[in-house]
Image (cartoon, rainbow, N blue to C red):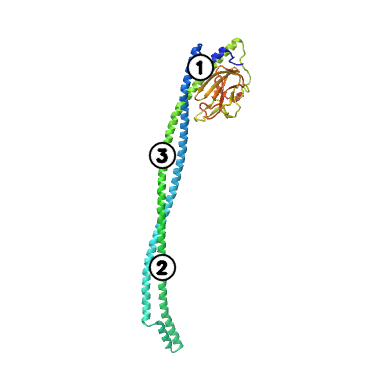
Amino acid sequence: MRLFPRTASQRLAAATVATALALGAVAVPLANAGDLKNRHKHAEHQVSSAKQDLDESSSALVAATRKVAAAKALLADANAELADVRTRLAAAQVLDNQMQAKLVTAEQRLTDSRQQLTDGQAALELQRQHVTATVTSIYEQGDPQLLAFASMLNAETPADLTSRMQATDVIVGRETGAYDDLHAAEVLLQVRENEVESAKNDVADQRRAAAAHLDTMRALHEETRQAKAKVRDLVDSRKAAAKQAWAARRHDSQVLRQAKAKEHRIQQHILALARRAAQRAARRGAGAGYTGSSGGFLMRPVNGPVTSPFGWRIHPIYGYWGLHDGTDFGVSCGEGLWAAAGGTVVSEYYSSVYGNRLYLNVGTVNGKNVTVVYNHMSGYRSHTGDHVRRGEVVGYVGDTGWSTGCHLHFTVLVNGTAVDPMNWF
């Protein structure tokens, strides 16, 4: 049994209730048709005036939240860049210390080599003087070769000849040894000169490398300064975005409270109408509606997968923990929405939170009123007061209100309280 039979008087009553609800009124519908029409226009004007502001508020929060997320992401990247440049600067500093140590070592090597060269030059000069004195002393006694030949001619015995030859070898050996020592000193001096030249080149290379590395260090210090400034700017940007998001969220929280209040008033009116309908049915001796299992009483309103079930969850846009008072079905925009059961459309209106909404009262089940609600619709096929059959298209899937994409948010109200729709299919 349906709670709202399709009669002209009850259609008028339902339309009147919808108009009163749009105004946020809780009084009984007025009987005057002219006054009803004026109030309906006034309600439409109120909804139209509020629509832009409410949509803008919600969009502002979404935009501000995105700014916060973007600022966080950019700040994370900037911090990573700063950490990277600091790491490179630290490595460059270690290398700089190593290069400075190598330069000091090279310079010390040059100093030592120059000192050794000076010492070698002095030693060579002494060696030359010694050779000159030795050779001069030898030749002052005559040519060693001639003296040796004359000495051997004057030898009288073989023993005397041997003795004279040995003496000659000593003289010639002294001369040869003096020249050998001089040559060795000259070779050593050349080695020291080469060492000085090598040390000078090493010092020059180390200084050039140090100068080039100094440019690298300066560039890294400047990069670090810029990275720090970027991080500071992004921190300020994130604070500003967070402040803006917080202000928008406060505003949207107020809008949400107002939407919930209006929804509560609609539910109270539906219950009031249900009580009056039940009283009229009782006076006529009619039945008290459907009695039996609720499972299968409703058909699915769309042919699509469940994307978010009934229950407590984190809101997909605003992030607060609250009751998701219906089941979300993932369906393309424009798809038809079916009447979950035969009943009467008791309200249709736009909410900045829920988008285009439609309330379909499907009667009394086990002594309790059952109303189903379609949210985020793109448009209506049925309107307030219309009686629809089970499976009839009442509207179309949309993405209106606070929504993250095309879908149907389907709510089942039992005596005004949201219950899990999946228990009714």
Question: Tag 2, which secondary structure?
Answer: helix
Give the residue number, with chain letter if any, for mark 3.
232
* Displayed quadrant of residue 383: top right
Number of residues whose C-alpha sits closer than 10 Å to that of mark 3, classed few (under 14), some (14–19) or many (20 or more): some
Gap between marks 1 and 2 measured at Cα? 114 Å
Disc marking residue 19 = 1
Question: Tag 1, which secondary structure?
Answer: helix
Q: Between tags 1 and 2, which lies in front?
A: 1
Q: Position of residue 28 (x, y in %)?
A: 51, 13
Q: Position of residue 161 (x, y in %)?
A: 44, 86
Is residue 163 placed above or below 196 in the rendered structure?
below
Gap between marks 2 and 3 measured at Cα? 63 Å
Numbered circles on residues, count: 3
The reply to whether discs 1 and 2 touch (Cβ–Cβ < 8 Å) is no
Give the residue number, with chain letter if any, for mark 2.
190
Question: Tag 3, which secondary structure?
Answer: helix
In which quadrant will I find the C terminus?
A: top right
Q: Is residue 95 visible?
A: yes
In depth, the one of 165 and 124 nearer the eye is 124
Horizontal side, residue 422 vs residue 209: left or right: right
Gap between marks 3 and 1 measured at Cα? 54 Å
Horizontal side, residue 179 vs residue 361: left or right: left
Amino acid type for the residue under numbered disc 1: Thr
In depth, the one of 232 and 337 nearer the eye is 337
Q: Earlier in the sequence, mark 1 or mark 2?
A: 1
Residue drawn 45% across the image and 27% down it: 250
Residue drawn 39% across the image and 60% down it: 108
